Image: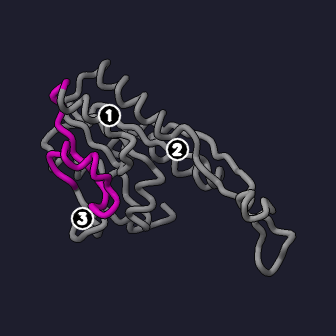
Amino acid sequence: MSIGLFIDGAYLLKTFREHIDYVKLRQHIESILDDTIDEGYFFNADTDPPKAEKLHNALTLPPPRGPGLRVKIYWLQKKQLFWPKQLGGQPVVHPDNPEIQFEQTTQKAVDVGLVYHMVRSYHKRKWTKLVLIAGDGDFHEPVQNLVESENVDLYLVGSVRNISDELRPYARSIFEIDQEPLHSQLRLSRPNA
């Protein structure tokens, strides 16, 4: 068992744009790499706790009933938006209803958590293949270290359009889940299941 699987849930949702069958995703990764996932993690922030809880519980079921992932949930931060001081510094409000002030919602600590658990998992388990379902260039340094210093093979899962240029040079392969035939293979046939 020498695959470490790390999934940025928000990235996967943005890239796949449909309900994904995580069991088929795991099976595809293991089949294409001819190896077994030793540890798999799913990182997300709770945007809709009741709906997310159902998904998160399903993700933790071990194979063959589930993908056997360890789910790590982080928090969201809301911040009210204001125009810059040079433009008056007033709140940014809805054009038709000035009672509604716009907010920016951002997930906090997901990337840091992913990097922490990825490096920790490698040093404890010594897997030789890293499957990263994320595209953020912020992962460049730890990925570079694992590939260059620890001789880990990197496989990226996502869309070539939104995988950072900093990550691509380290990848042995990119599995494009937004392209056919992989997209159809991983689409969940029963979204409510």
Q: Give the mark, 1 or 2, whose residue is nearer the N terminus.
A: 2
Q: Type of residue at label 1?
A: Glu
Q: Nearer the viewer, residue 132 or 53?
A: 132
Left or right: 38, with 96 as reference point: left
Q: Give the mark, 3 or 1, whose residue is nearer the N terminus.
A: 1
121 is higher (above) or lower (below) than 95: above
Residue 30 location (% of width, % of height):
20, 44
* Category of crowding for the residue at label 3, using alpha-carbon neighbours closer than 10 angstroms: few (below 14), some (14–19), many (at least 20): some
* Category of crowding for the residue at label 2, using alpha-carbon neighbours closer than 10 angstroms: few (below 14), some (14–19), many (at least 20): few
Q: Type of residue at label 3?
A: Leu
Residue 83 location (% of width, % of height):
72, 62
> What residue is disc 1 on?
141
> What residue is disc 3 on?
182
Residue 184 location (% of width, % of height):
28, 69
The magenta segment is: 149-174
* Category of crowding for the residue at label 1, using alpha-carbon neighbours closer than 10 angstroms: few (below 14), some (14–19), many (at least 20): few
Instruction: Give the SS element for disc 1.
Output: helix
> Magenta segment: does it hold 154?
yes
Q: Depth-wise, is mark 1 or mark 2 nearer the camera? A: 1
Give me the C-alpha separation between circle 1 and circle 2.
32 Å
Q: Depth-wise, is mark 2 or mark 3 nearer the camera? A: 3
> What residue is disc 2 on?
57
Instruction: Give the SS element for disc 2.
Output: helix
User: Of the numbered discs in the image, which one, if any, rests on residue 39?
Assistant: none
Q: Type of residue at label 2?
A: Asn
Give me the C-alpha separation between circle 2 and circle 3.
25 Å
Left or right: 123, with 154 as reference point: right
For the point 46% across and 50% down, which residue is it? 9
